[in-house]
Image: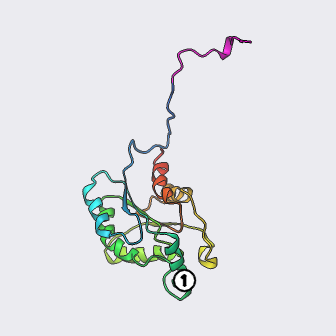
């Protein structure tokens, strides 16, 4: 049996209207991947900063499950709970990133993002830079050694609330490092 629709259910000249986000801050967001694993080279990230003129964000994805376990073991033995190479990365990248207003987002905080934050602030100060460094992490990460994957939401919150030069995270989904700048920019 075939039924014919009439009245208010009729659809004529249907067009798709794209959603407009009133919080959208720019038409395009340029996100560079300066590191894809813990052993990556900081000089490659510097070349990206130097060559990509429209860059808004630089992501340093340096944390893996093995790295997280190494950091927990180091912290338990009195060492750093964050990736100590963050110092080398920031000494090289911060001057140009700050000058060009490019936000660096990294998961090098591992088990101790606040410790990494303090380290980056000290490095910036030694370079004569005034920076804002935000952290996105689980509160229980240091005490328990248990870590779950966070998504983009805590990074977005940091972007919206603090507009930092650097965001340091604990364990987050790799895609969250890239998705957060897009969401934070209104996409």
Horizontally, residue 3 falls left or right of residue 20, namely: right
Q: Secondary structure beneath disc 1? A: helix
Q: Quadrant of the N terminus?
A: top right
Residue 127, percent from left and from top: 31, 75
Which residue is disc 1 drawn over? 73
Above or below, 33 relative to 68 = above
Q: What residue is shown at x 49% (from left), y 35% (from top)?
A: 20
Horizontally, residue 99 falls left or right of residue 103, namely: left
Dominant secondary structure, magenta: loop
> Is residue 146 inside the magenta stretch?
no
Horizontally, residue 89 falls left or right of residue 73, namely: left
Residue 57, percent from left and from top: 38, 56
**Residue most extreme to the bottom:** 77
Q: Which residues are magenta?
A: 1-15
Q: What residue is shown at x 43% (from left), y 45% (from top)?
A: 25
Residue 153, percent from left and from top: 56, 56
Query: Where is residue 140, by image quadrant?
Result: bottom right
Above or below, 90 relative to 33 = below
Q: What residue is shown at x 48% (from left), y 52% (from top)?
A: 179
Query: Where is residue 33, by image quadrant?
Result: bottom left
């Amino acid at each position: 049996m075939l039924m014919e629709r009439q009245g208010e259910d009729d659809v004529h000249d249907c067009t798709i209207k794209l959603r407009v986000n009133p919080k959208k801050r720019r038409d395009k967001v340029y996100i560079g991947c300066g590191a894809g694993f813990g052993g990556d080279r900081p000089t490659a990230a510097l070349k990206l900063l130097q060559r990509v003129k429209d860059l808004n964000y630089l992501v340093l994805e340096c944390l893996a499950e093995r790295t997280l376990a190494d950091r927990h073991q180091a912290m338990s033995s009195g060492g750093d709970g964050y990736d100590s190479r963050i110092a080398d990365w920031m000494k090289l990248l911060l001057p140009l990133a700050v000058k060009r207003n490019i936000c660096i987002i990294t998961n090098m905080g591992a088990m101790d993002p606040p410790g990494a934050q303090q380290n980056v602030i000290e490095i910036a100060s030694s370079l004569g830079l005034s920076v804002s460094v935000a952290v996105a992490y689980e509160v229980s990460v240091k005490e328990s050694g248990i870590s779950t994957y966070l998504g983009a939401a805590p990074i977005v919150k940091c972007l919206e609330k603090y507009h930092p030069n650097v965001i340091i995270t604990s364990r987050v989904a790799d895609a969250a490092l890239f998705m957060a700048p897009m969401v934070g920019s209104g996409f």
